[in-house]
């Protein structure tokens, strides 16, 4: 009988003994035993309750044969990649000079001047000894492309040697990096640029090009750009923006440029847009009983929140004395707010209500503001954000240097929904390199119910998150409805506002406010193109009353409020939801600094804390993609500080956390490594566990950790994200946030395991947050 490679996850010594007994050529790690097995052995292992994981190749074969594992229930992969490499390449070769440019690139590779990209597929998990054997040949696996398939740049001479390694299945040239590593932009998308976007100046078209950073000489790229009739208009460490004249065949140009050995990714550039909009009680900051101070006493004091938005009315009393800087990036020496968006966003994050006797307050009224004004001008009625730098590192770094550890972004690119864009990669790279920086993005307002492909009639379609909110390491925020039933358009119906987007009931008939268990119809839905959960969390985003800029006209708002001297106005949008989460992050960060004594809590631990406490909403549209957490409508649920942080009014609620920030305190170095923790649990409260990590940049999860939970003396096992949209309770191979939620736990000792399924780029720090009626300590077993 033929044998295949399988991996058996081992949770205790009995599992390990049995796996070692039954597998051929077994290799052991702390987390699993991998080896060869025939089908009878697999059946026997599974019958005994062991968790068996097949190779990606076997899973694909079983899927093609109608096997038992269907991957995502939505089968999204078939609809996302609408263009083929064949289509684009065919177009490319009709351009003049194309052949010359491509041949020159090929020649430089063949003569050993440059390494070329390959896809290298191994068999089973990426064991440390595999990585070492590859390193001996001078090969670095740069990016995980799929499970067990990696991109590496190889010299012509190394290709054969790599192929000869026993664990290497295949080594094939990667012809088109953008096709494989980016989310391919279809030829159709390119073709409509300048037509569907009324604000796009169609006399010029742009491509963004990311270089391989190892080449410090741009000559070959610049030559090719010139030959193709383009002009470099902006440049950073890794990136160029190239202008082409109107009518240029962008898809063909991109296909040629992406074939140059020095080029990583190429994508069209379209200007990003703003994501326009009682919140405090709704997010868990409940009013105090008479005579008592509020139960949650944190207000963000000592935290600096950075906000990149239109501008700031810095004369508004609600920010008085708490603005550390207002930086003008979009207009020369002018950071005022004629749009009203930035002032409103800042008010939701940290306004203190000075102009309203404390009644209209943001979430972190004690925090300090570092504001970056990115609004430049209004073209054809659209507010342009030309102050955004070419490379987002240039946006985040000055804020980081000014002490901000939370950065809010209520904007995104509506032209390339669900895609992992170069800018998403930049967000992930920055957070990976600066792991204390929490970057918050609004999910986008692209939710639409017309002609839905992945939702029932009258429900909002999937796949509409706007990059860079698709980034893995961002905390991405969708919008739930406010509980207001009047004001700010709350009593109007979604179908009245936008009948073209919401033509059918039920969504067309539902009101914008009044039902906080439901979502804003416009709130962008997940998943991302690589089928990750997004948004991560939702917060109120309709009929939001916040600070009004004195320089913005009435038409900029969803409603004005005469009270309080006209200092406040209504807006709606995921733009308004994101800063509430940024404000909440400031409270959580303050908690970790002041109560837990962490000088620099990681972005991952703050993200894990907020996600762990999120309340899963029950509205029909909130659970349309999946009845349990997480799903593609609301992610892990709605922001809820009451259930996120310990406080006076929930005395039996305890939070334990691990912030494994480096190798010295638990960060993981190798595939197969395990960290295990023990905690005692009472039956009083739900038990909730969240694992989060800031992954290396790249499309899809690069370093894959797995969360598993067991109760001592029981064979019952909980797996991270086991209730996500999928057919089987397998480990999650897509997401860098994993949860276990046990609504009514039996009392006992629980073991929490963090295991490394794949470590491409060590070390991998992680954060683990555990809440419930749990014991006073969390014990690290190993
Ligand atoms: Ca995982």
Image (spheres, grey):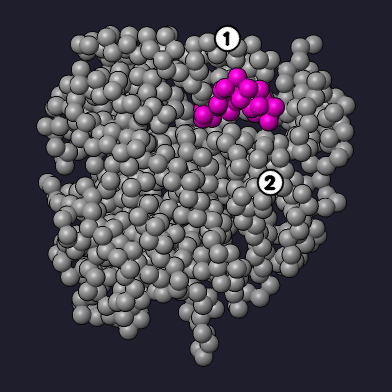
Q: Is residue 144 magenta?
A: yes
Q: Position of residue 714 (x, y in %)?
A: 83, 49
Is 288 on the left or on the right of 132, as rendered? left
Q: Which residue is mark 1?
A: 160
**Front one among 231 and 679:** 231
Quadrant position of residue 318 = bottom left
Residue depicted at 83% across the width and 42% down the height? 12
Indicate the quadrant where residue 47 lies. top right
Q: Residue at coordinates 55% horizontally, 13% vertically from top-left?
A: 158
- Tell me how many marks there are: 2
Q: Quadrant of the N terminus?
A: top right
Horizontal and vertical percent for residue 713? 86, 51
**Pick the front one: 257 or 189:** 257
Rendering coords of residue 489 (x, y %): 27, 63
Q: Is mark 2 within 8 Å of ligand 1?
A: no
Q: Residue at x 64, y 60 (%)?
A: 657
From the viewer's perspective, is 471 left or right of 689? left
Q: Are marks 2 and 1 in contact (CB under 8 Å)?
A: no
**Foreground residue among 87 and 158:** 158
Asked whether, in this view, residue 174 is left or right of residue 67, the answer is left
Label 2 and label 1: CA atoms lie apart by 37 Å
Residue under label 2: 754
Q: What's the magenta region?
A: 126-149
């Amino acid at each position: 009988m033929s044998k295949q490679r399988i991996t058996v996850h081992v949770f205790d010594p009995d599992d390990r003994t049995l796996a070692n007994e039954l597998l051929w050529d077994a290799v052991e790690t702390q987390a699993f035993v991998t080896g060869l097995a025939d089908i009878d052995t697999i059946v026997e292992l599974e019958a005994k309750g062991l968790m068996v994981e097949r190779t990606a190749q076997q899973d694909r074969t079983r899927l093609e044969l109608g096997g038992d594992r269907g991957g995502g229930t939505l089968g999204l992969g078939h609809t996302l990649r609408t263009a083929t490499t064949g289509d684009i390449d065919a177009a490319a070769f009709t351009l003049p000079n194309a052949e010359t440019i491509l041949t020159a690139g090929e020649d430089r590779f063949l003569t050993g001047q440059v390494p070329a990209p390959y896809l290298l597929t191994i068999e089973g998990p990426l064991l440390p000894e595999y990585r070492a054997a590859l390193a001996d040949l001078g090969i670095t696996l740069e990016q995980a492309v799929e499970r067990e398939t990696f991109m590496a740049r190889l010299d012509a001479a190394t290709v054969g040697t790599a192929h000869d390694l026993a664990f290497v299945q295949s080594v094939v040239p990667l012809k088109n990096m953008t096709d494989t590593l980016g989310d391919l932009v279809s030829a159709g998308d390119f073709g409509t640029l300048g037509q569907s976007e009324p604000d796009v100046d169609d006399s010029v078209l742009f491509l963004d090009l990311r270089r391989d950073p190892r080449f410090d000489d741009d000559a070959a790229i610049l030559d090719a750009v010139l030959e193709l009739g383009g002009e470099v208009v902006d440049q950073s460490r890794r990136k160029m923006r190239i202008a082409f004249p109107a009518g240029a065949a962008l898809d063909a140009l991109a296909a040629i440029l992406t074939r140059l050995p020095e080029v990583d990714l190429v994508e069209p550039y379209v200007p990003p847009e703003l994501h326009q909009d009682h919140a405090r009680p709704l997010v868990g900051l409940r009013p105090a009983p008479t005579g008592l101070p509020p139960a949650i006493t944190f207000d963000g004091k000592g935290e600096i929140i950075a906000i990149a938005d239109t501008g700031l009315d810095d004369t508004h009393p609600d920010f008085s004395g708490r603005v550390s800087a207002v930086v003008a990036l979009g207009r020369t020496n002018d950071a005022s707010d004629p749009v009203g968006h930035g002032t409103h966003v800042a008010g939701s994050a940290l306004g203190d209500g000075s102009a309203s006797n404390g009644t209209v307050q943001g979430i972190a009224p004690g925090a300090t503001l570092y504001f970056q004004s990115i609004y430049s001008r209004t073209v054809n009625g659209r507010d342009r954000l030309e102050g955004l730098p070419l490379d987002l590192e240039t946006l985040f770094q000055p804020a980081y240097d000014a002490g901000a550890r939370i950065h809010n972004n209520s904007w995104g690119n509506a032209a390339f929904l669900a895609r992992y864009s170069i800018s998403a990669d930049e967000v992930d790279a920055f957070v990976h390199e600066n792991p204390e920086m929490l970057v918050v993005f609004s999910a986008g307002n692209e939710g639409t119910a017309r002609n839905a492909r992945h939702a029932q009639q009258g429900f909002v379609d999937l796949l509409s998150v706007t990059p860079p909110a698709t980034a893995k390491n961002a905390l991405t925020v969708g919008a739930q409805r406010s509980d207001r039933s009047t004001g700010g358009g709350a009593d109007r119906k979604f179908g009245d506002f936008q009948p073209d987007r919401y033509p059918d009931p039920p969504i067309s008939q539902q009101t914008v406010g009044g039902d906080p268990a439901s979502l804003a119809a416009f709130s962008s839905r997940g998943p991302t193109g690589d089928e990750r959960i997004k948004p991560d969390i939702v917060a109120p985003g309709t009929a939001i009353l916040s600070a009004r800029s004195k320089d913005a006209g009435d038409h900029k708002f969803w409603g004005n409020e005469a009270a309080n001297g006209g200092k406040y106005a209504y807006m709606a949008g995921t733009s308004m939801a994101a800063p509430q989460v940024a404000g909440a992050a400031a409270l959580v960060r303050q908690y970790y600094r002041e109560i837990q004594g962490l000088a620099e809590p990681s972005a991952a631990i703050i993200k894990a804390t907020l996600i762990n406490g999120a309340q899963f909403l029950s509205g029909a549209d909130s659970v349309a993609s999946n009845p349990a957490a997480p799903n593609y409508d609301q992610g892990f649920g709605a922001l809820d500080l009451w259930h996120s942080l310990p406080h006076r009014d929930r005395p039996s609620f305890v939070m334990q956390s691990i912030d494994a920030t480096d190798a010295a305190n638990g960060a993981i170095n190798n595939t197969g490594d395990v960290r295990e923790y023990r905690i005692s649990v009472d039956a009083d409260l739900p038990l909730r566990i969240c694992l989060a990590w800031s992954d290396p940049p790249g499309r899809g999860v690069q370093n894959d950790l797995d969360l598993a939970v067991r109760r001592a003396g029981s064979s019952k096992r909980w797996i991270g994200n086991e209730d996500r949209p999928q057919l089987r309770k397998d480990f999650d191979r897509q997401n860098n946030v994993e949860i276990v939620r046990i609504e009514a736990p039996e009392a006992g000792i629980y073991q929490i395991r963090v295991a490394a399924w794949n470590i491409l780029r060590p070390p991998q720090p992680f954060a683990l947050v555990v809440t419930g009626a749990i014991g006073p300590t969390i014990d690290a077993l190993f």
